[in-house]
Image (cartoon, rainbow, N blue to C red):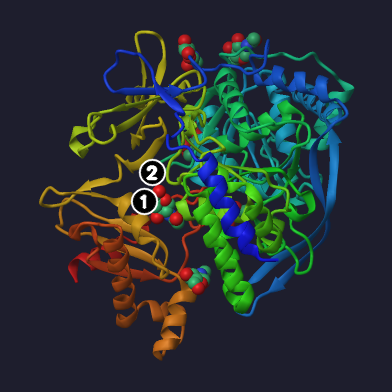
Amino acid sequence: MNPYIFGVILPVLATLLFRSNHPKRRGVPTDTTDPGVTVRNKRFDSPVETAWEGVSTLAELFEEACRKYGEGLLLGTRLLVSREMETSSDGRQFEKVELGGYEWLSYAEVFEAVSSFGSGLAALGHGREHRAAIFADTREEWFIALQGCFRRNVTVVTMYASLGEEALCHSLNETEATTVICGKKELKTLVNISGQLDSVKRLICLDDDIPSDASSVGHGWTIISFADVKRLGKENPVDADLPLPPDVAVIMYTSGSTGLPKGVMMTHGNVLATVSAVKTIVPKLGKKDIYLAYLPMAHILELAAENLMAAVGAAIGYGSPLTLTDTSSKIKKGTKGDATVLMPTLMAAVPAILDRVRDGVFKKVNATGGLPKKLFYLSYERRLQAINGSWFGAWGLEKVLWNFLVFKKVRAILGGRIRFILSGGAPLSGDTQQFINICLGAPIGQGYGLTETCAGGTFSDFDDTSVGRVGPPLPCSYIKLIDWPEGGYLTNDSPMPRGEIVIGGPNVTLGYFKNEEKTKESYKVDERGMRWFYTGDIGRFHLDGCLEIIDRKKDIVKLQHGEYVSLGKVEAALIVSPYVDNIMLHADPFHSYCVALVVASQSTLEEWASKEGIPYSGFSELCSKEESLKEVHASLVKEAKKAGLQKLEIPAKLKLLSDPWTPESGLVTAALKLKREAVRKTFQEELLKLYSS
Ligand SMILES: *[C@@H]1O[C@H](CO)[C@@H](O)[C@H](O)[C@H]1NC(C)=O
Ligand SMILES: *[C@@H]1O[C@H](CO)[C@@H](O)[C@H](O)[C@H]1NC(C)=O
Ligand SMILES: *[C@@H]1O[C@H](CO)[C@@H](O)[C@H](O)[C@H]1NC(C)=O
Ligand SMILES: *[C@@H]1O[C@H](CO)[C@@H](O)[C@H](O)[C@H]1NC(C)=O
Ligand SMILES: *[C@@H]1O[C@H](CO)[C@@H](O)[C@H](O)[C@H]1NC(C)=O
Ligand SMILES: CC(=O)N[C@H]1CO[C@H](CO)[C@@H](O)[C@@H]1O
């Protein structure tokens, strides 16, 4: 069989027959008379508030779904088979687990658990006017507790499980939460800081085995297990106390990149608008879908996604980032990761995780070498050309052939059945998007939104294979660009309007909890009563109504002689260098050039050193060598030229760092975004040295 019959002749014929020269319009201007350029989703005239008739809160949405899908499977969790500690070659300890199959609860069973939990809360003395906080990793009980609170009209306070102690105290103090729902790991942290928590009265531990040292401490806290709360509720049932659309459903504390976290108040109406909008984006969502849940529930993307799945009859299987695939770090060798066991059809992801999947695959392919490697790159190239600009090219016989020969194995990494990936939290690189399109054969919907807009914003259509853009406005949002003259971005720029992105619609949240000043700064209500959030991001609109994020206001810094440097833009261009794992550019008005902190890629740098015969005793020593600095700097200059950066945008000096930046170290957020302030503070001295040397 000659693959070129399928590979070349048929696709060319097909492309000639079907290709259209006009880009499909996806967003259209609205006829408002505001200053700036406002665009809405083409398919909806005014912002969507709910996709379900007669449903106006998340509590109603869930109850409706349970009535409709009663015996269908809803929540699944893997059983723990064994747990052991393994010691790596450099003496560090790693936990490895073996996990079994999924155990499922049906919609009806979950509904009963939710009602019992809600009643249990009441029986424990938690009044609905008090707030309850959930501080735990993503898991089945998280979802049940959330819905239980909704049914009692109790506002839920959420925060990242990786939040530092100071931020944790701050958010619990500020919201005066009386009940904290947590896992046993988080329980230890809470007990540790109990002296600073005045409002907390009870802890509900999601694990049955409450640490014995925790309950003995006293503090006047009631510490009770999740199972016991449900039991209590079952014995003392109370009626639901359903909320209304303007009632606050969640106060979400985000790990801000500066200062203490701010709590964003989201009403039931806000979240429902986002959930409704995403429903219109994912094609043919329904009972047959299986969703792999593993991102933090304290992230609006995950919270909205799980509420959506539970509204359409889909099943939600829980996993974690460390056990996602067969080769994930916590999975015992030879046993199966979450995706292989669950075989999901849908998942949400942040770009950092998809980048990791991509790098892993390329590394493995390169290590194989020989014919399989050649075949992989040949097919990858063919597919790249085929999907470039024409969705038709993404189908066809050639795709079937390559999928069968090459990509089936890659698909198997995520279980083999993925049909759609939702990506959000940060911009996805074009390379990674194409990798997912090609190797997983699945469309990827890229969203742009913020906690403040309840993740509402834009979302790319599933049939749009262009890269680097975030799609047209969601059906629940209006997107407006306004001039930012200081930064040089104007709405009458050609060929595309550019400016600060402002998001409006029913999805825009109420504002920051107990922070009138910050709320006034970023939120505005226009004369028609529409709420708008000023994002501080800079974007431009393409002809078809799709948005592209090009900059951040905060990240544009003026140098000594008045030139502007966009930190994010430069970092995005330089991180492409194989020597760079992570990079932060620093610029300020006191100097005429910029400098950079670079987390070096250990494998690339060591490979280079051994090739060059450079002696070193450890990676950190290698990072401090003059030769290494030179080599990395040359590589950065090369990438900078490729990306067309100005000379003054290229860092004049570098510091190479050997330790990676992780959420645990507090230098990046849980979504792996840089926390500039934290990095600057940590490496204050290094930065000073760079400028003084
Ligand atoms: C829900 O709770 C809030 C806060 O306690 C209260 O203002 C609101 O009236 C309640 N909603 C209903 C429908 O009772
Ligand atoms: C929380 O409040 C208590 C008492 O009101 C105080 O001692 C503690 O410092 C506060 N913690 C934070 C992080 O604000
Ligand atoms: C408890 O606090 C101590 C000292 O403040 C700290 O060293 C320890 O890591 C904390 N433990 C937990 C579980 O947070
Ligand atoms: C794999 O090899 C290709 C070309 O052979 C190269 O472009 C790519 O950078 C390599 N990737 C990795 C992760 O080693
Ligand atoms: C995709 O198409 C654009 C223009 O249509 C072209 O500039 C680019 O080189 C193409 N990329 C590939 C990988 O074929
Ligand atoms: C809570 C909120 O922001 N509600 C607004 C939702 O959007 C409509 C217009 O589409 C406004 O009228 C509401 O005030």
| Disc number for residue 676 | 1
Contact, CB < 8 Å: mark 1 with mark 2? yes
Q: Earlier in the sequence, mark 1 or mark 2?
A: 2
Could you tell me which residue is drawn at 43 percent across and 35 percent down?
A: 23
Mark 2: amino acid: Thr
Could you tell me which residue is drawn at 41 percent across and 70 percent down?
A: 579
Which corner quadrant holds the C terminus? bottom left
Q: Quadrant for ligand 1?
A: top right
- Residue hosting label 2: 258
| Residue 623, image x, y percentages | 38, 76
Viewer-closest of 184 and 81:
81
Viewer-closest of 34 and 668:
34
Which structural element holds mark 2?
loop
Decide if residue 667 is in sight here.
no
Figure check: 377 above or below 607 = above
Figure check: 85 above or below 630 = above
Mark 1: amino acid: Arg
Q: Is residue 180 left or right of residue 299?
A: right
Decide if residue 240 is in sight here.
yes
Q: Is mark 2 within 8 Å of ligand 2?
A: no
